[in-house]
Amino acid sequence: MSVRNLLSRPFTVAALAVPLLASSTSGRALPRPVPGGPAEPSALGAAIDAAIERQSICVGSTVASAGELGDVLYYRSSPGERGELSVGYYAFFSEERPWGNNWLTWTVLPALAVDLVYTHTLLLGPGIQRVAYGKGDVEGFRILYRMDEAGRLAADHAVADRGDHGEVRLERSDLLSVDPARPTVYSRWWSHQLGGQGAGPDDLVYRRCYGAGAIRPLPPDVALDFRLDRRAAPARVVPAAALLGQPSPSRRGDAAAAGATDQGLAFLPTVAL
C-alpha cells in the first residue's frame, strides 16, 4: 500500500499513531524522596510509625494503563477513640491518560478526545486535570487497623475510590483476596482509582509491594507540591490545613493542642513492637 493511500485513511493513521504519540509525550511527575523528612516524632509516635512502615502494602491493577507507579507510598495516620488506627496512603503515578487495555483505546476516538482536553491540551500541554487537581496523578486509600495480641497491625477494612470517583468500602476479605499475607488495593480503570473488588491472585497485570523504607510519613512540601488538600480524598485522615503543615483553624493554642495529642495517643502503650 502506498503512503498516499495510507494517508487517505485518517482513522487508520489515528489508530496507529495516536497511542505512540501518547506514550512518547508522557511526562514525569513523581515525588523524589529526600533524606530526613518531618520533624522527629515522640517516642510513642515513633513506635506507631515504625509499625505502619513495617506493614507491607501492595498496589496493583487488573488493566494495563498509562503512568508509572512511584517508588514511595506516603502516609498520614490518626488514632481513634477505641484503640483503632486510621492510616491514609498516597500512591503517586507519573500521569493519568486514557491509553491502555480499555474500550477508549480500542475505539481510538474516545481516548483521543479525553487526551486532547482533560489529561493534556492537544496531546502536549497540561490539560484540565492539571489545572483542577495538580501535577501527576495521586490516588488515595485509607485502611483502618486494629492491634492483635502481639501488637501487630491487623487490617479491618479500607476506603478507596471507584472509577466514578465514588467511595467504596473494602472489607478485609477484599484486601486479602490477592495475597492473604499482604493487604492489596488495585484498580480496574485507566484512571488508577484503587477501589477495585473481586480480583484473584492471577487477575492483576502488575502489582507493586511497599514495605520498610518505601512507606514513609507524608512531608508537607510534597502535600503542597501535589495539592493533596484537594485530591486523593479517601486517604485524608487529618484536615486539609494540617495535611499541608499549616495550623488547623480550630487549634486553640499550643497547650490545648498538646493536651489533645496526649489524649489521642492514649492507646499507644498497647502497641508491642
Image (tube, grey):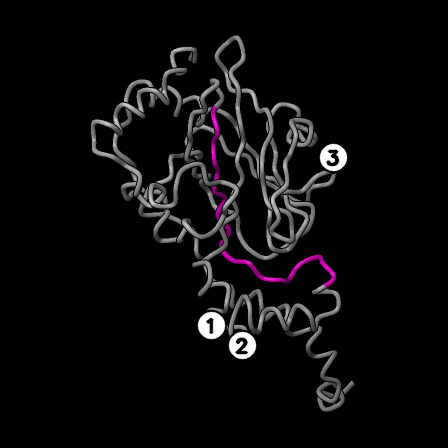
Hey, what amino acid is under mark 3? Answer: Gly
Seen in the picture, residue 161 relative to 145 is either above or below; the reply is: below
Asked whether, in this view, residue 248 is left or right of residue 176, the answer is left
Find out whether residue 102 is within the magenta segment.
yes
Q: Looking at the image, which is closer to me, 33 or 49?
A: 49
Quarter residue 118 falls in:
bottom right
Secondary structure beneath label 3: loop
Q: CA distance from mark 2 to mark 1?
A: 7 Å
The stretch in magenta equals 85-103
Q: State the image coordinates of residue 37 (x, y, percent, origin top left).
A: 30, 37
Secondary structure beneath label 1: strand
Give neighbour class at mark 3: few <14, some 14-19, many 20+ (Cα, 10 Å): few
**Residue corresponding to mark 3:** 200
Q: Residue at x 46, y 40 (%)?
A: 236
Q: Quadrant of the C terminus?
A: top left
Find out whether residue 108 is within the magenta segment.
no
Q: Looking at the image, which is closer to me, 92 or 42?
A: 42
Q: Which mark is residue 122?
A: 2
Hey, what amino acid is under mark 2? Answer: Leu
Q: Residue furthest top?
A: 149
Residues under numbered marks 2 and 1 in contact, where contact means CB atoms less than 8 Å apart:
yes
Q: Residue at x 47, y 31 (%)?
A: 87
